[in-house]
Amino acid sequence: MAKTSSVERNEKRRRMAKKFASKRTRLKAIATDEARPLEERFEARLKLAALPRNSAPTRVRNRCELTGRPRAYYRKLKMSRIALRELASRGQIPGMVKSSW
């Protein structure tokens, strides 16, 4: 199980990314628009840099929802390989069986 502080910090980042998403996309559109004057684009870049760092979606780390493990994460299932194997062994995932050959 991951430290609670790590999981909570990640949840805070997820909330901030969602909160600032519209403002961030608007500023990025202004900053990359070649038709706008240079000063206006530069000002948009400064405003973008002034936003909180944790509001950037790249700072969000995918973590297992059961254990908080940051590695070996399956996006579709939102869990790590270890949690997936435990649930499958217990028969709690429909259609998934232990392989043998």
Image (cartoon, rainbow, N blue to C red):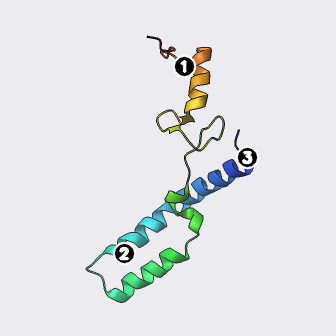
Q: Is residue 89 left or right of residue 48?
A: right
Q: Is 4 located above or below residue 74 in the figure? A: below
Label disc, if present, on residue 3 of the rendered structure: 3
Q: Earlier in the sequence, mark 1 or mark 2?
A: 2
Viewer-side residue, 33 vs 65: 65
Q: Amino acid at mark 1?
A: Ile
Q: Position of residue 96 (x, y in %)?
A: 49, 17
Q: Amino acid at mark 2?
A: Ile
Q: Is 80 located above or below residue 17 in the figure? A: above
Residue at figure coordinates x 40%, y 70% from the top left: 28
Which residue is denoted by mark 2 in the rendering? 30
Instruction: Find out whether the residues at labels 1 and 2 contact each other: C-beta distance under 8 Å.
Output: no
Q: Earlier in the sequence, mark 3 or mark 1?
A: 3
Which residue is denoted by mark 1 in the rendering? 93
Q: Amino acid at mark 3?
A: Lys
Q: Earlier in the sequence, mark 2 or mark 3?
A: 3
Choose top left, top right, bottom left or bottom right for residue 86: top right
Q: Residue furthest top?
A: 101
Q: Position of residue 42 (x, y in %)?
A: 40, 84
Tag 3 secondary structure: loop
